[in-house]
Image (cartoon, rainbow, N blue to C red):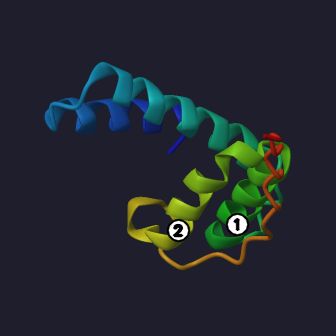
Amino acid sequence: MNTTQAINRVRQVLRRQHKALSTEDSYVFWLRRYSAAVSGMSPELSSEKKVESFLTQLTRKYPEYQFACLWAWLFPAHFPCRERTRLRWVSPPTPPTSGP
């Protein structure tokens, strides 16, 4: 299945479930982003390794996405990878403390 077919299938399923258009747009955005990342990976890698690599790269580049990646790790049934991945977490920045 290519990216266009996957996007069309996601749209059909979400519309059948009467999801909001913004939800559909969000799912399609992440599907395109994942497809672009996977296209540069070795075809010999398993699906689990591809998901692990994608989520790890995402948390390194954008630490604010760590919660979304944690969600993908804790609830793998919602994602293509059915097994937990071994993510390497980036420590979130320490918030500045304000004096009295």
Which structural element holds mark 1?
A: helix
- Residues at badges 2 and 1 in contact (C-beta under 8 Å)? yes
* Drawn side of residue 78 relative to residue 20, left or right: right
Residue located at (71% from left, 70% from top): 49
List x then y, in percent, for residue 32.
Answer: 60, 33
Mark-to-mark CA distance, 2 and 1: 9 Å
- Looking at the image, residue 59 lies above or below residue 23: below
Rendered residue at 76%/69% (across/down)? 45
Name the residue beneath numbered marker 2: 81
Residue at position x 65%, y 62% in the image: 51
Q: Quadrant of the C terminus?
A: top right
Residue extending furthest toward the top: 21
41 vs 100, nearest the viewer: 100
The kind of residue on which mark 1 rests is: Glu
Q: Is residue 85 left or right of residue 99?
A: left
Depth check, front residue: 95 or 72: 95
Residue 79 or residue 75, whichever sits in front: 75
Q: Is residue 86 above or below residue 37?
A: below
Quadrant position of residue 14: top left
Q: Measuring from the top left, give residue 95's x and y in whole percent.
A: 79, 46
Q: Quick check: 100 above or below 22?
A: below
Query: Residue lying furthest front in this view?
Result: 100
Q: Return the x and y of residue 75 as percentages of the image width and height.
A: 43, 69
Q: Which mark is residue 52?
A: 1
Q: Secondary structure at mark 2?
A: loop
The foreground one among 85 and 37 is: 85
